[in-house]
Image: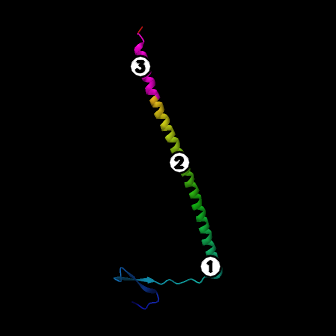
Amino acid sequence: MSGSSRTGPLLSCNNEKESIETPQREVPNVTNKELTEIVKSLANSVVHHDDQIEAHSRQIDGLIRVTTELRVSTVELRQTVEKQSVEIANLIREWQGYLRTVRPQ
């Protein structure tokens, strides 16, 4: 391990089998005012992100509600089609029976 001021401590990987040196970063001088602005900026970003998540949650809830309504409508339509199919089949049989009784002219 070198004693250079440009590198930090060795990091161990894979159960001490490998070691890599990480460059040591210089910490910039930051004033309290700058730190306060950074924290405010981060807080605003979090609030904005939370607002976006809430908006997406409302959209998802709306889509779930619409999907549920459409599912109910689809079931109702399927039941109506099945009922009408039975009625049409019965009507066809009735007409066929009637037409057999009518003499050709």
Cα gap from disc 3 to disc 2, whole angstroms: 42 Å
Q: Secondary structure at mark 3?
A: helix
Q: Dot 1 surroundings within 10 Å: few (below 14), some, or many (20 or more)?
A: few
Q: Please state if 84 lies on the left or on the right of 49 as rendered.
A: left
Label 3 or label 2, whichever comes before in sequence order: 2
Instruction: Based on the picture, tell me whether residue 28 belongs to the magenta stretch.
Output: no
Residue 45, image x, y percentages: 60, 68
Q: Look at the magenta stretch and give its main secondary structure.
A: helix
Q: Which residue is label 2 attached to?
A: 68
Looking at the image, which residue sits at the far left? 17
Residue 77, image x, y percentages: 50, 38
Q: From the viewer's perspective, is residue 93 above or below residue 60?
A: above
Cα gap from disc 2 to disc 1, whole angstroms: 49 Å
The answer to the question of whether label 1 and label 3 lie on touching residues, with beta carbons closer than 8 A, is no
Q: Which residue is label 1 attached to?
A: 35
| Bounds of the magenta segment | 87-103
Q: Please state if 102 lies on the left or on the right of 58 as rendered.
A: left
Residue 96 has which mark?
A: 3
Q: Secondary structure at mark 2?
A: helix
Q: Secondary structure at mark 1?
A: helix
Looking at the image, which residue sits at the far top? 105
Compare residues 89 and 1 and report the one nearer the observer: 89
The structure residue drawn at horizontal position 53% and vertical position 51%, both measured from the top left corner, is 64
